[in-house]
Image (cartoon, rainbow, N blue to C red):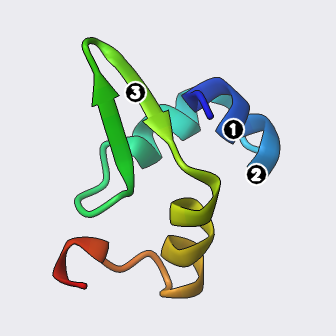
Amino acid sequence: MSVKEMGAYLGISTGKAYELVKTEGFPIVRVGRKVLISKSGLIRWIEKGGQNLANE
């Protein structure tokens, strides 16, 4: 999903969503300049309390 879609999914502003994406360990994939977030990765990140998933 896009950052804007993630913000809507979480019920936060687009600005807050972009701040969240910049968090270390946040599960994003970059395709060129586009930032994408997998729904399953987002859910795992939330379940882990926002911890870095890179160590898994």
Q: Which of marks 2 and 3 is nearer the N terminus?
A: 2
Left or right of 33? Residue 45 is right
Amino acid type of the residue that numbered disc 2 sits on in the rendered structure:
Leu
For the residues bearing labels 2 and 3, Cβ distance under 8 angstroms: no
Q: Residues within 10 Å of mark 3 (few under 14, many from 20)?
A: some
Query: CB atoms at circles 1 and 3 under 8 Å apart?
Result: no
Task: Provide the residue designation for mark 2.
Answer: 10
Please report the residue visible at 40 percent of the width from the left and 27 percent of the height from the top: 35
| Tag 1 residue | 7
Between the residue at mark 1 and the residue at mark 2, the CA separation in whole angstroms equals 5 Å
Q: In which quarter of the image is the N terminus?
A: top right
| Dot placed on the residue nearer the N-terminal end, 1 or 3 | 1
Q: Nearer the viewer, residue 19 or 42?
A: 42
Which residue type does callout 1 highlight? Gly
Q: Which residue is drawn at 59% across and 85% down?
A: 47
| Circles 1 and 2 in contact, beta carbons < 8 Å | yes
Residue at the left extreme?
55
Query: Mark 1 packing: few (<14 Cα in 10 Å), some, or many (20+)?
Result: some
Residue in view at x 64 percent, y 54 percent: 39
Task: Report whether 36 appears left or right of 23.
Answer: right
Q: Residue 42 placed where, x, y %? A: 56, 61
Q: Which amino acid does label 3 sit on?
A: Val
Compared to 56, does 24 lie above or below? Answer: above
Q: Mark 1 or mark 3, which is nearer to you? A: 3
Secondary structure beneath disc 3?
A: strand
Residue on which the image places disc 3? 35
